[in-house]
Amino acid sequence: MSDKIKISVVIPVYNVEALLPRCLDSILGQSVREIEVICVDDRTPDGSGAVLDAYAARDSRVIAVHKEVNEGPMMARETGYSMARGEYIFFCDSDDYLPDGALQSLYDAALQSGADITAGNSVSVNRQGREVLRDRASRLGNTWQSYMTYILNWGTPALWGCLFKRSLFEDTGYTAIPHMPFSEDRRLLTEILLLSHPTVEPLRRVVYCYWANPISTTRKKLTDKAVRQQFGALYGTYDFIEEHTGEFTHDNDGQMTRWLSLYIERGVKASSLCKAEPRNAALLRFAAMRRNIGLKGALHTTLCIRVPGYGIVMNSLRRLIRKAQGKD
């Protein structure tokens, strides 16, 4: 292998022993050979650490980092990108995998465009193996502002499926919060966009396979603690945006209102949300909802609050539609 490392792949690892080999095999089998695969074992309780050691023993491109204490995915990613030596950084979740040629396509597009971020499409793969396209590239645009607008309007804030110039992570001091189980991708990507103002190159090719893991953190049952954590994380990003620019206030309010609407539909009481964060009360006023998410969204949320059983029925319908689409 050449001394030049083209891509550093960063993988936080926790409790994924059964799925980890598929992830690593898909990366090590890529046509781009000049890579390093930085796997950060976040003090996993299962045998994932041993899997990493076995791969590292037979392939020098795999770097197994074993943390002494569990700190969560945000800190694990920071450990990984702080060690990276490649021209570019690619983030991968340990239960996901890459299609053939993914890294080569991203790398070629990045070199041709010179963009700071090259963002491809993905597919969501359910337990039956059905693939559903998650189209990001057609909505991104080529500027950091267009990427920010995309995220704030229900676009995926996921780090995966993107190639980042390593220079974006040098001397930046991005936020890394221990044990942040929600929206950690959103916070890091938001800071990259607002602090570094990167150029963007959308790539309309599937470069990532997202495994719709039924036991992942984002799919666990809602609890009061989980709701507080989620909105604490969301408001952390919300406030960061407002502190750095007033350009996205309407979209920022719209995103937060949509999250409130979704949680209320799922059965969380509006009064509980307002108690957890007093600013939610203003966003849940009908006039504010109409301004931020439109009349249809405002009416739907109001019905969820005031009509017993309406939200449960609508959320069940939403789940049935997602299942029929192969998303769950």
Image (spheres, grey):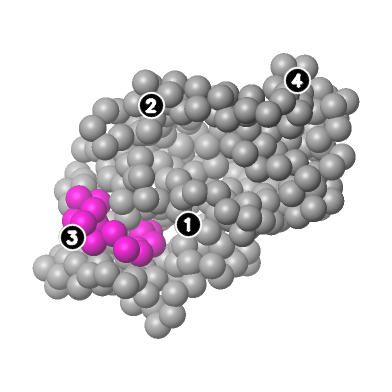
| Residue found at the far top of this picture | 296
Q: Amino acid at mark 4?
A: Leu
Front label number (1 vs 3): 1
- In this view of the protein, can residue 146 be seen by the observer? no
Which numbered tag is attached to residue 166? 1
Q: Earlier in the sequence, mark 2 or mark 3?
A: 3
**Residue at the spot of label 4:** 299
Q: Position of residue 158 (x, y in %)?
A: 49, 44
Q: Earlier in the sequence, mark 2 or mark 4?
A: 4
Q: Amino acid at mark 1?
A: Arg
Query: In the image, 89: left or right of 300?
Result: left
Front label number (2 vs 1): 2
Dot 4 crowding, Cα within 10 Å, few <14, some 14–19, many 20+: some
Q: Amino acid at mark 3?
A: Met
**Residue at the spot of label 2:** 323
Helix, strand or loop for disc 1 = helix
Query: In the image, 238: left or right of 181?
Result: right
Which numbered tag is attached to residue 1? 3
